[in-house]
Image (spheres, helix red, strand yellow):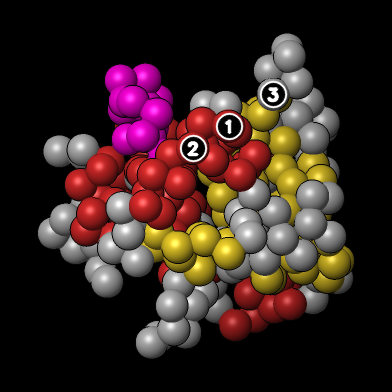
Amino acid sequence: MSLSGIFPIDKWNFTTQSILNTLSEEDYKFLISSQGEQKYQKGERVFKEGMIPSGIFFIHSGKVKKYKVDQTGREQIIYVANSGELIGYHAVLAEERYPDSAAVIEASVISFIPKDDFLCILNKSPIFAQRLLKAISHEYTVLANNISVFAQRTAVERLAIALIVVREKYKAETPEGQEVTIDISRNDLANIVGIAQENVIRILREFKAEGIIETKGRKICVKNIRKLVDRSNYK
């Protein structure tokens, strides 16, 4: 079911996938196709906060979480990137160290793009540069919305919103007509929402009892998206 008219997903979701569509076939091959591919296992780190960047990354398949770690070692997941997206470009553009870490949440295939190659295409293609700037601007809006709304929401409302947003990530790669299944650990869900894992498990049980979701192991299927939107209490 579409979220159109019942939940403003654009305020919660951003992507860099469409940016690459502006590249010519030659530039796309130079930036993406000619780079080597590396397989990552679930949980494997792509880059670490504080590292000096030597390039950016393109996700061919899989999903990658971007996160920060506090002084107690707890993660706060900022964003989940899909296949077809670029990550790591903020630090390259700012000429700073990586401001966060990235790790795969499922088996993934990722290409490393050297900094010089990325900057070469950025300078060569004004449209690519404009689209990237637009994406960064929207990303800031989304993150600001996350911070302000999550600070004022109950644990139930925050988890409902997180499930809606993460479901859209999985929906994007689910063939039409097939049921959308979220495959994510309870710990990662807790780190997205900012609550204890035990609370995530308890609330998921409530959602299941209400017929909003079904679960099988770590997999979650949203059976009633309208009810989930109602539980998010997002106006």
Camera sees residue 74: yes
Q: Nearer the viewer, residue 13 or 129?
A: 13
Residue 87 seen: no
- Residue carrying label 1: 198
Report the magenta residues as a range: 146-159
Q: Does residue 184 sit above or below 186 in this rendering? A: below
Kindly identify which residue carries mark 3.
Answer: 74
- Residue shown at 35%/66% (left/top)? 223
Q: Secondary structure at mark 2?
A: helix
**Quick check: marks 2 and 3 in contact, CB under 8 Å?**
no
Residue at image mark 2: 202
Report the quarter where the C terminus lies: top left
In magenta stretch: residue 166: no
Q: Residues within 10 Å of mark 2 (few under 14, many from 20)?
A: few
Using the numbered discs, state the Cα–Cα distance from disc 1 to disc 2 in whole angstroms. 6 Å
Q: Quadrant of residue 68?
A: top right
